[in-house]
């Protein structure tokens, strides 16, 4: 998966939190974005050009604190500006509480709740704290007055909500039955364990005694200014909180963050789209007097907030209910296009045991994939949970096409399906597959000590990796699939086996997909294969891993072909050589891999490949000749025609001059005559193989459905028997 696919990088907040009582936020009460670095620095107590105080001076600590606050605010501002640009746009455009309940499938329940709880919340609205004349008024008669600060504001809010929640047992039983229990904790001065973030408060699941980041349910942030919801720094700050929760909780559907700004409350829903912003209205009074207008407004806000707090976690924030137990065991069921997931135990049939998350690349929004080291039916496995835009191709469907065509070098998939077809424009799918060993990045990091790196032996290993990956990509292309993200991280080695993984960026090549496979995928996955035919968009944010992209992809060519995947394989070979002699892959240390912009990267690659010392430009100058021989073969096939270098022709994004040319030469030079014949024979017979495999898949699906129906019938019979036995026992006891 791409490491550089996002323009946004969130600030590191392990030991910093902006002082939000500073003049920075106060001066932004009008909603004017503060992105000028000088004004931010000055607002934190620094003057431009001031000398740094001596480390031994009493001013040094204050200076360091102000400097950190200024730095954090600037980064928050950049993130907030980017997030605000997308708020209210696209499929995540929810701007009302009614829209939220509809998206969550809770509209009917909410309407019933509000119609039956007005009297209860009128009583509590009458007891609401007030924000009035720079003070926070609390107590039954609002006779306790505290200076208006973030701490005072949040404390009043927390105590008020806790009092209401403890009284909720008086509500009708249907609203409180089975509700999850949560606990509040203030984190303004201490970071949440393992998260490094310091929101004003958080709501935790009571199952976790240490209140770690993996047990956070809802995040709360308080600001004094009533207009803080319009400040970019504030949005960036709570965006970092949401991102941190996303990183720690792979069962998330979205992260809710409540922003208390003055007497007002706003809810932010951080899904994989841009955040949805939902104003909830006033939750505090704005005067020390009682009036009906205040009461009515407060009742609506309290009803909406408390309705959400009553929801189990699988209804508000997660894909499963994790409020009482962690998601250490998960069970999956249903079909490809309508899969189900539930928290399970070790006794559950076909359960997935989650050992640890082995890969996380999580940003505040857009695509995210959680890859977990797991155990399934006694075998080591990998569980992959992916949120992707609904316009994208389900990765499980891609694996199905590859499997039906008998493509080699792909992992065995044990189970897969779509859990959530569309939540605010994004789809959640799961894949359980065999464990495929180490990525090339990890594999070659262990080969950098030259004493243990035998050139002749390991050059053969590298040549075999290139051959096996080439066979996989060529077969996939014949089957109608283009990978589009060939990288060191997406090729793995386990013993003598080589796998190509992460087909999440793949596209179908419509003309190569057989009618049988097309029909099967349409039926079982509920997608239209034709709508996922290969097309490219300029600056496509999901186009691959930048340092391994082909030149034509970097210049935003309108089409892609197998040549682009093979060119990425060429950069993978150079990356392996770089890694084996430097200990780790670092794209910034090799001009050919370094990325500042797509256009500059394309020019750097084109210039580097055409140079006689191209290996040096890609950080592989120390590689022995045996290794460079593999790279040289690829270089010649990809970038030379009739002895002439054509690399600069690839900067023309209208046409790839390699199309349709050179494949037989590629098969012969890189794969050898035997593999060349094998590839050609495979391509001629894959249609018949696909037809047979489709029929086999239909029979397997029918058998699975019948088995599940029989299990459900047996379970229902057991329930009926148990109920009958209990009834008989009760009657006998009564007679006795």
Image (spheres, rainbow, N blue to C red):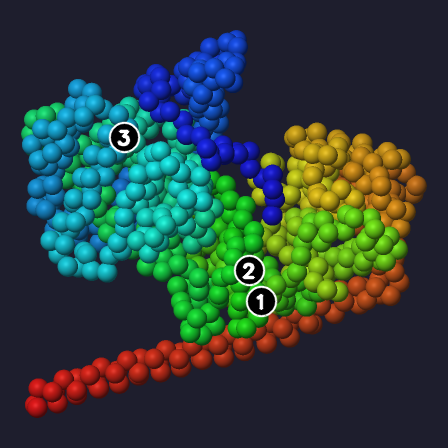
Residue at the image position 61 percent from the left and 36 percent from the top: 538
Q: Mark 2 to mark 3: distance in Å? A: 41 Å
Circle 2 sits on which residue?
373
Q: Position of residue 735 (x, y in %)?
A: 7, 90
User: Residue sitting at 52 percent across and 14 percent down?
Assistant: 54
Residue 320, above or below 92: below
Residue 39's disc is none
Tell me what residue is drawn at x 32 percent, y 48 percent.
204
Towards the viewer: 491 or 111: 491
Task: Tell me the residue at 23%/60% (across/down).
Answer: 178
Q: Position of residue 516 (x, y in %)?
A: 60, 68
Q: Identify whether 208 is placed above or below 155.
A: below
Which of marks 1 and 2 precedes in the sequence?
2
| Residue nearest the viewer, comparing 495 with 49 | 49
Mark 3 sits on what residue? 151
Residue 426 placement (x, y as % from top left) = 45, 48
Tell me the crowding category of disc 1: few under 14, some 14 to 19, or many 20 or more residues within 10 angstroms, Cα based. Answer: some
Q: Earlier in the sequence, mark 2 or mark 3?
A: 3
| The C terminus sits in image quarter | bottom left
347 is higher (above) or lower (below) than 298: below
Label 3, residues with CA under 10 Å away: few <14, some 14-19, many ≥20: some
Image coordinates of residue 715 in percent, x first then y, are 34, 80
**Residue wearing tag 1:** 380
635 relative position to 532: left or right: right
Left or right placement of residue 211 versus residue 615 in this view? left
Q: Nearer the viewer, residue 265 or 248?
A: 248
């Amino acid at each position: 998966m791409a490491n550089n696919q996002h323009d946004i990088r969130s600030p590191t907040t392990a030991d910093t939190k902006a002082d939000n009582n500073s003049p920075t936020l106060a001066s932004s009460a009008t909603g004017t974005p503060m992105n000028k670095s000088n004004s931010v620095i000055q607002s934190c107590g620094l003057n431009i050009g001031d000398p740094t105080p001596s480390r031994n001076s009493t001013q040094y600590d204050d200076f360091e604190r102000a400097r950190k606050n200024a730095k954090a605010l600037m980064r928050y501002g950049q993130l907030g500006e980017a997030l605000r640009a997308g708020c209210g746009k696209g499929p995540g455009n929810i701007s009302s509480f009614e829209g939220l309940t509809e998206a969550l499938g809770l509209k009917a329940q909410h309407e019933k709740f509000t119609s039956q709880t007005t009297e209860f919340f009128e009583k509590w609205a009458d007891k609401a704290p007030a924000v009035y004349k720079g003070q926070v008024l609390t107590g039954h008669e609002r006779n306790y007055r505290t200076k208006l600060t973030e701490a005072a504001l949040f404390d009043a809010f927390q105590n008020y909500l806790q009092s209401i929640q403890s009284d909720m047992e008086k509500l009708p039983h249907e609203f409180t039955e089975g509700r999850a229990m949560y606990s509040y904790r203030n984190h303004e001065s201490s970071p949440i364990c393992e998260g490094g973030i310091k929101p004003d408060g958080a709501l935790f699941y009571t199952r976790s005694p240490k209140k770690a980041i993996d047990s956070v349910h809802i995040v709360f942030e308080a600001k004094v200014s009533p207009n803080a919801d319009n400040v970019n720094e504030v949005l960036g700050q709570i965006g970092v909180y949401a991102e941190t929760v996303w990183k720690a909780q792979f069962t998330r559907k979205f992260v809710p963050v409540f922003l208390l700004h003055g007497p007002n409350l706003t809810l932010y829903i951080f899904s994989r789209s841009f955040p949805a912003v939902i104003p909830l209205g006033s939750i505090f009074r704005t005067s020390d007097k009682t009036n009906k207008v205040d009461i009515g407004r407060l009742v609506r806000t309290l009803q909406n907030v408390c309705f959400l707090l009553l929801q189990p976690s699988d209804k508000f924030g997660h894909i499963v209910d994790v409020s009482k137990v962690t998601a250490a065991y998960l069970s999956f069921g249903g079909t490809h296009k309508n899969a189900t997931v539930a928290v399970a135990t070790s006794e559950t049939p076909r359960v997935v045991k989650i050992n640890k998350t082995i890969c996380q690349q999580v940003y505040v929004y857009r695509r995210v994939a959680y890859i977990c080291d797991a155990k399934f039916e006694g075998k080591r496995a990998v569980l992959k949970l992916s949120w992707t835009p609904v316009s994208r191709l389900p990765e499980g469907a891609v694996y199905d096409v590859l499997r039906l065509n008998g493509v080699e070098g792909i992992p065995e998939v044990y189970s897969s399906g779509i859990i959530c077809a569309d939540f605010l424009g994004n789809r959640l799918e799961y894949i359980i597959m065999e464990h495929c060993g180490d990525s090339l990045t990890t594999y070659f990091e262990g080969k950098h000590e030259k004493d243990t790196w035998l050139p002749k032996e390991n050059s053969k290993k590298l040549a075999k990796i290139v051959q096996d990956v080439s066979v996989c990509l060529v077969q996939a292309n014949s089957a109608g699939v283009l990978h589009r993200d060939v990288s060191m991280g997406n090729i793995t080695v386990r013993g003598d086996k080589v796998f190509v993984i992460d087909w999440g960026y793949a596209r179908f090549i419509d003309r190569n997909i057989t009618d049988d496979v097309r029909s099967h995928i349409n039926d079982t996955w509920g997608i239209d294969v034709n709508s996922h035919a290969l097309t490219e968009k300029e600056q496509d944010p999901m186009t691959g891993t930048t340092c391994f992209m082909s030149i034509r992809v970097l210049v935003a060519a309108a089409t892609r072909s197998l040549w682009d995947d093979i060119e990425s394989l060429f950069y993978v070979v150079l990356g392996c050589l770089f890694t084996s002699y430097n200990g780790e892959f670092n794209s910034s240390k090799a001009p050919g891999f370094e990325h500042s912009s797509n256009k500059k990267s394309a020019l750097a690659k084109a210039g580097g490949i055409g140079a006689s010392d191209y290996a040096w430009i890609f950080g592989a100058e120390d590689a022995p000749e045996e290794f460079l021989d593999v790279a040289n073969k690829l270089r010649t096939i990809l970038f030379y025609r009739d002895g002439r270098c054509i690399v600069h022709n690839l900067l023309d994004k209208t046409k790839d001059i390699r199309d349709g040319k050179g494949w037989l030469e590629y098969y012969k030079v890189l794969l050898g005559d035997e593999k060349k014949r094998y590839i050609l024979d495979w391509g001629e017979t894959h249609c018949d193989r696909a037809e047979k495999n489709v029929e086999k898949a239909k029979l397997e699906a029918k058998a699975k459905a019948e088995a599940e129906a029989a299990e459900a019938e047996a379970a229902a019979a057991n329930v009926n028997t148990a109920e009958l036995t209990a009834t008989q026992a009760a009657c006998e006891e009564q007679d006795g």
